[in-house]
Image (cartoon, rainbow, N blue to C red):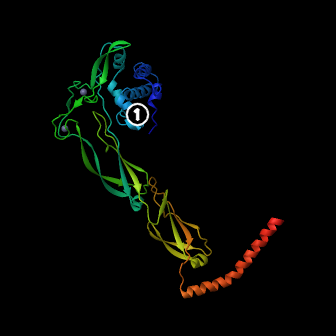
Amino acid sequence: MAEKRDYYEILGISKNASDEDIKSAFRKKALEYHPDRNKSEGAESKFKEVNEAYQILSDSEKKNRYDQFGHAGVSGAQSGGAGFEGFGGFGDIFDAFFGGSQSNSGRKASYRGADLEYPITLSFEEAVFGGEKGITIEKLFPCDSCKPVSCVNCNGTGQIKRAQRTMFGQFTQVVTCQTCSGTGESFDNKCQTCKGAGRFKNSKNLFVTIPQGIDDGMQIRLQGEGEPGLGKGQNGDLYVIVKVEEHDIFERSGNNISMDIGLNIPTLVLGGTIRIPSIQGEENLTIPPGTQSGQVFRIRGKGIVDVREKNKRGDQLVTVNVKIPKKLNKQQTELYKKLQEITEDDTKKNVSDWLKNKIKDTFS
Ligand SMILES: [Zn+2]
Ligand SMILES: [Zn+2]
């Protein structure tokens, strides 16, 4: 999604601008970019942007929300271009600021429904292998018990004409009808289901397809499963936000799986083949003689399938650590002692060599 520009910046005003400043900045920009007058490329999108900024900043409640939360505080309401649709042609804007003949374009507002988020927690295996997961969401639904009727407040036009006296003289302003939010539709107050709202809250069961290899923090978008739009506006989307639980043994980084394993001294010294757990069961791992503690072995292709490219697969990384026994039986103790005796001479020799070299380095 493209980054949205700051509304104050769009209108070229400061955050402290008065209502009058906002209005006059909007008038200037709207006249400059209105597609009926400005045929240059990009004028229409500029105009929409200007209009959207004005819709928010001219409404004290929306302005407060915008000042506090930025675009997130006012998203949904304007993302369908409601402001532009609601305002109609150049005539309406001209009328709004300079008075004159009323030309009602009859274009009604429509609002895209809000996007919803649903957090979901998956086990390590569910994320690695994917599958289907049932969820229950609470959201608004369009009322199916009553039919929309024409809004009485605006006669179904979605707009209210209001006479106003300003520094430009008296003029008729066209504003969005508050009763129907400019959609021109209203619903039966006596409707048991929606009580006149046209929408009602209910729960819905959905199956979410978890793609193989999904990772913590990723989102699954279910198009149209957000809240219903108003007027002709389309539904919002549902974003399922994935959280993946930690695994007892495996740790994930991208498509690779790492794990630590402790091995006894003889295996590290003499080498051998060990069995290690993998996400597909068990694997053989060959430990070469003289393996050091902390050495990492890579088993290619035993990691996680890439969530986007099914033929790409990560590796399994095994870090081998030495496991020192805390208790020994009699035989082991004897053998370790024997080993110590024959190793000691080597160690003494190594230490004295090291010291000799150290002294040589320091004084030469
Ligand atoms: Zn209305
Ligand atoms: Zn209803």
Above or below 173: residue 128: below
Q: Position of residue 134 (x, y in %)?
A: 30, 55
Q: Quadrant of residue 244?
A: bottom left
The answer to which of 158 and 348 lies nearer the viewer is: 348
Report the amino acid beneath label 1. Tyr
Q: Residue furthest right?
A: 364
Q: Quadrant of residue 103?
A: top left
Q: Position of residue 14 (x, y in %)?
A: 47, 26
Q: Which residue is mark 1?
A: 66
Q: How many marks?
A: 1
Indicate the quadrant containing the C terminus: top left, top right, bottom left or bottom right. Answer: bottom right
Q: Quadrant of residue 342?
A: bottom right
* Residue 81 in view of the camera: no
Q: Position of residue 156 (x, y in %)?
A: 23, 26
Q: Residue at x 45, y 26 (%)?
A: 16
* Residue 328 in view of the camera: yes
Q: Residue at x 34, y 16 (%)?
A: 95
SS assignment at label 1: helix
Indicate the quadrant containing the N terminus: top left, top right, bottom left or bottom right. Answer: top left
